[in-house]
Image (cartoon, rainbow, N blue to C red):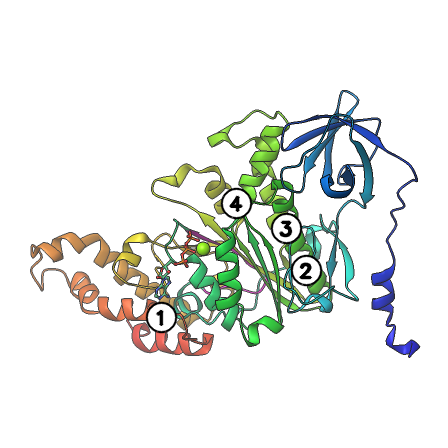
Amino acid sequence: MLNSFTSEYLDGLACGGFTPRPKVSGRLSSYDGLLMEAVGLSLPVGTVCAIGTGESRVDAEVIGFRGGKTLLMNLGGPAALLPNTPVRPVGAPGEAEVGAAMLGRVVDGAGKPIDGLGPIRGAGKWPLAGKIQSPLDRGRVLQPLDVGVRAINGLLTIGQGQRVGIMAGSGVGKSVLLGMMVRAAKADVIVIGLIGERSREVSDFLETKVAGEARGRSVVVAVPANHSPVLRIRGALRATAIAEAFRAEGKKVLLIMDSLTRVAHAGREIGLALGEPASARGYPPSAIAMLPSLIERAGTDVHTGGSITAIYTVLADGDDGNDPVVDSARSILDGHIVLSRALAERGVYPAIDLGPSVSRVMTDIAGKAHVNAARVLRRHLATYEENRDLVLMGAYRAGADPAIDAAIACHDSVLDYIRQAYDDTVSLEDAVTELVGVFGDA
Ligand SMILES: Nc1ncnc2c1ncn2[C@@H]1O[C@H](COP(=O)(O)OP(=O)(O)OP(=O)(O)O)[C@@H](O)[C@H]1O
Ligand SMILES: [Mg+2]
């Protein structure tokens, strides 16, 4: 009987190093729906406090202090609070529940299970903000990761430990593409952070994309748009912390975050509420500065051999070439996959626009013949796109330029290569064989 209390289970029961001092309590001095100020408290940033009791209790997180007052951010919904309501510390600064006990479960930003399967027992703990690592603990990206999508496996090969952005406008097929990868990726564990999306989309994603076999090896952290910005950021940190703990066990983890832009939006709400000046596109500097620290936590661990391959979606509509989130994501990530509305409108799904898409590690992880064939396909596509108008208008005369002739001749096979039904899986091996077979000897 006693043996069934594994040390992991007992650790789960322990309450960590934090011991709230008895009877510390302050009073609420101001509240504007989001930001609260309390007096008479001295607590570390990150502490969760209960404000009020009973029906009207809400939880808030300490996010800073100014002029002798503690600043807290509401974690719950709107609350009927009165001036001088007592404020009591109730929780340690951020730790996430992690480990095998989380597999198959869905939790919210605060770590509470929302899948109706009861409490999570025997979970380990991991700091929400991660553990500091030396840059030399990070291995290089040397092994490809099979994600089951032909165009990505063949043309934008993702490596284990790589951080990739999927940049696209709304409704271009990001969620469907992520769903394909959740189902087919050859990873030990898949951690999915659904941050700031519509609630309807969260349940849709869970029911249609994290179903069947994929559910058992997945952990989902879902924080929809109507939750407090602090919870949305906690959700992103929590998903990353869960992935880190699996990596520390030597597992090959795929971390999916939909969307990074909404995490930055949450950072923007907090920064502005704290009185930070808005700079680029209304984003205060802290909202953008948070992104590298989140993204840098993914990667390969040389000690355990585990890896976190991370895929972040970034909203980029129309002319948003100068959106600060797109910009900073592009500069920190090791590759980006751009989805194009024009392709989606022509019914080419997944609507991957190869021109601006790159995988910066592909040449390290793919064979020579593979890289060459991918280059040939890209060249044909680029030539076709450059001359597309001429060809469609009939202004191009066949035979005038052999490169254009070749591009026209193989344009259909290029599109066929990109196209893939959402319930279809193409392994890395098949994708490469097909690519080299068709475009290999040019
Ligand atoms: N592989 C596919 N095959 C067929 N249709 C697709 C495919 N991918 C996307 N679609 C179509 O595009 C629509 C929008 O896709 P999806 O919900 O993935 O977009 P999104 O980029 O996640 O949108 P949002 O910005 O609203 O989150 C789908 O409802 C579907 O009709
Ligand atoms: Mg979506």
Pick whichever, 329 or 40, lies toward us: 40
In the drawing, what numbered circle is on residue 420?
1
The quarter of the rendered structure image containing the N terminus is: bottom right
Q: What x and y, as percent, mark residue 135?
A: 68, 51
Of callouts 2 and 1, the N-terminal one = 2
Rounded to the nearest angstrom, the CA distance separating label 4 from label 3 is: 11 Å
Rounded to the nearest angstrom, the CA distance separating label 3 from label 1 is: 32 Å
Task: Tell us which disc is closer to us: 1 or 4.
Answer: 4
**Is disc 1's CB within 8 Å of ligand 1?**
yes
According to the picture, the residue beneath numbered tag 3 turns out to be 235
Question: Considering only vertical position in the picture, is 157 above or below 169?
Answer: below
Q: What x and y, as percent, mark residue 192?
A: 58, 60
Q: What x and y, as percent, mark residue 434?
A: 36, 77
Of callouts 3 and 1, the N-terminal one = 3
Q: Are marks 3 and 1 in contact (CB under 8 Å)?
A: no
Q: Which residues are magenta?
A: 157-167
Secondary structure, mark 1, is loop
Q: Is residue 86 left or right of residue 395?
A: right
- Within 10 Å of disc 3 (Cα), the crowding (few <14, some 14-19, many 20+) is many
The quarter of the rendered structure image containing the C terminus is: bottom left
According to the picture, the residue beneath numbered tag 4 turns out to be 262
Pick whichever, 125 or 396, lies toward us: 125
- Within 10 Å of disc 1 (Cα), the crowding (few <14, some 14-19, many 20+) is some
Q: Amino acid at mark 1?
A: Gln
Q: What x and y, as percent, mark residue 358?
A: 42, 56
Q: Are marks 4 and 3 in contact (CB under 8 Å)?
A: no
Residue 59 in view of the camera: no
Residue 98 in view of the camera: yes
Q: Amino acid at mark 3?
A: Gly
Pick whichever, 427 or 172, lies toward us: 172
